[in-house]
Image (tube, rainbow, N blue to C red):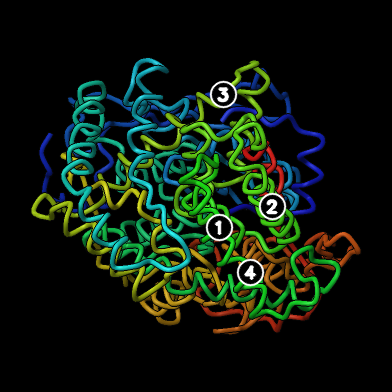
Amino acid sequence: MTVVVMRFMKALHSVPLLAALVASSPTTIHPNNLATRQNTISWKSCTQNSEYECATFSTPLDYFNPSVGNAELAMIRYKARNQPRIGSLLVNPGGPGLSGFAFIESLGQSISESVGGYYDIIGWDPRGINNTIPRIDCFTSNDDNQTWVAKLDAIDIKTGRTFTAGDADHLRGQTDNIDATLSAYFEACSAVEGEKLKYVGTAATVRDMVAMVDAMDGIGSPVNYWGYSYGTIIGSYLVNMFPERVGRVVLDGNVGPFTWSSQPPHLRPRNYLVDSEKAFDGFCKACAEAGPRCVLARGRDATQIKDYILSLMDDIQREYIHGFYYSTADFRFDLFCGMYFPMFWNVLAQEIFKRAEEIRVFSATGHNPESRRQNGLTPLKRRLRKRIAMGSAINPVHFLSQLAINKAKGDGEDDDILPMNEHAYHAITCGDAIDTSNITTRVMLDEIISVTENVSSLYGPALSSEAGNYCHRWGVRAAERFTGPWNATLANRILVTGNTADPITPLSNSKWVADQFGDKATLLIQNAYGHTSYSMPSACTLHAIERYLISGELPSQNTTCETDTRLFDSPTGEAFVPDNVWDPPKATPVQAGSRISNSATYWKPSTSSFVLNGIFCIALSILSS
């Protein structure tokens, strides 16, 4: 997700939010083979913001076959403000499919402040995304895009609180239609994008990063990187493909790289949802403890609040059949989305309460359509809800940036967001995956049923649209795929973080990633709900990351940081984070790489306060309005 929240929230008020076919075998990795590429970067002041510099950087589409042509990467830089300059810090907000350019354009100054101003903060649009060429749009007109949005939306699983045998049979009965839709979707996209789909994989993105650092900091310089969610996949590829180039690397909210690269992608939700219901139980518990500060409490304990919410799902299912605008699929996605950001659980509680009131009025008026919201949910808005709900699919800060652009253009709908995220999301996700052309759609649907029955009855149906479920009918894999090994000997130690109750990237993933490197990786655990460490501010975690990036100091192995966030704290339910959390970092800058010792330097964390990603409430209100 994102970084240092209150700093970012301040930035949000002062900085404009700007825009955002046959499977191939994996290519053997040759780390030093960078082919012919641009050796310098010509930075110019960005027209939209003079504090930032922009550039276009050329790299080979295929590092092993330069004759294929070039990629043109859109880059942005917020220069270091203090000396000594440590180097460049590349930042990726997640996805795949997010504009790292827009992310840094909006928040680069805040990220710079969080690391003492000692780095050039670098954002870029990875291949397939936004202003970079190749860009994956799949459709040449908005009408075509809307048509496919509606078709893909039809794959939603709408069921009450209990997923019954009848629901399973109904889903299996749609096998032929879903299979035809997925096949036709790929065919339509590949007809427009053609060979470009082969050149947007993560392995090529990592080679681009190394080439960028060579051009910015000098050939062979250490690569410093901060990645969230899917950004940790980029990070895992980076440190294992180029272990000798590892500088300071932070991987927060880890997607399992082995799961991503080497297992059938339709199995991913089985891993993603391991801790998801821990977060939901935490929401119910926090609401009950808040009493009147949580609109759903009303004397209920945590068990009763949970039952109230699940019973509402049955009510929605019943009224949807009679024409209610909002389905249980929408409700599950909103619940799933809400688990990402405990800082805004008061907003989630209010939204749940609103749905209950709408259902009551709709039912009491004899299913009168005039009683429902007149705007309803278009298929596109419904898909945007899904992209928020998929932690490996969208960063809410970036989402709001994209949304702001379209609103500024006066668009009635959010037409430009989906191509920038959804189609690149599928192309990169499936391009990185193993060949699953032998998997049938029936097998994929049976896996959704199994995950619902055995892993998460609440959220299993919500991940029916996860991109991995499309890959068996996505007929292209990346020209270069990396599948490990994942235990390279690193030039410098890295920092891996994870939450105890992350709804989409379970703590076990972060532990696995760190364990592969032995004493070359330090695992920092945050005892908190939400997606990535920044979802519930903790000074202990924030200061650990800042100290590491500035001076190379690491916390003790397996340090557990408590959160300083008080949920539902105010009379109206807002969370509270102490002011001292935003104290500037206190660390002496030291450059990474061969210029520092590889011996471990540890510090003992203190307990204070910290960060948050504050966009969920805004994005949710926009999509609900």
- For the residues marked 2 and 3, what is the alpha-carbon distance in whole angstroms? 22 Å
Expressed as whole percent of the image width and height from the top left, the position of residue 44 reads 61, 21
For label 1, the crowd category at 10 Å Cα-Cα, with few meaning under 14, some 14 to 19 and many 20 or more, is some
Going from N to C along the chain, the mark reached first, 4 or 3, is 4
Nearest to the eye among marks 2 and 4: give it: 4
Q: Amino acid at mark 2?
A: Glu
For label 3, the crowd category at 10 Å Cα-Cα, with few meaning under 14, some 14 to 19 and many 20 or more, is few
Vertical arrangement, residue 52 with respect to residue 96, above or below: above
Q: Which mark is residue 308?
A: 4
Q: Amino acid at mark 4?
A: Tyr
Q: Would you name the residue on which mark 2 appears?
A: 351
Vertical arrangement, residue 143 with respect to residue 292, above or below: above
What element does badge 4 sit on? helix
The outermost residue toward the front is 366
Vertical arrangement, residue 406 with respect to residue 235, above or below: above
Q: Which mark is residue 240?
A: none
Expressed as whole percent of the image width and height from the top left, the position of residue 339 reads 59, 62
Expressed as whole percent of the image width and height from the top left, the position of residue 92 reads 51, 47
For label 4, the crowd category at 10 Å Cα-Cα, with few meaning under 14, some 14 to 19 and many 20 or more, is some
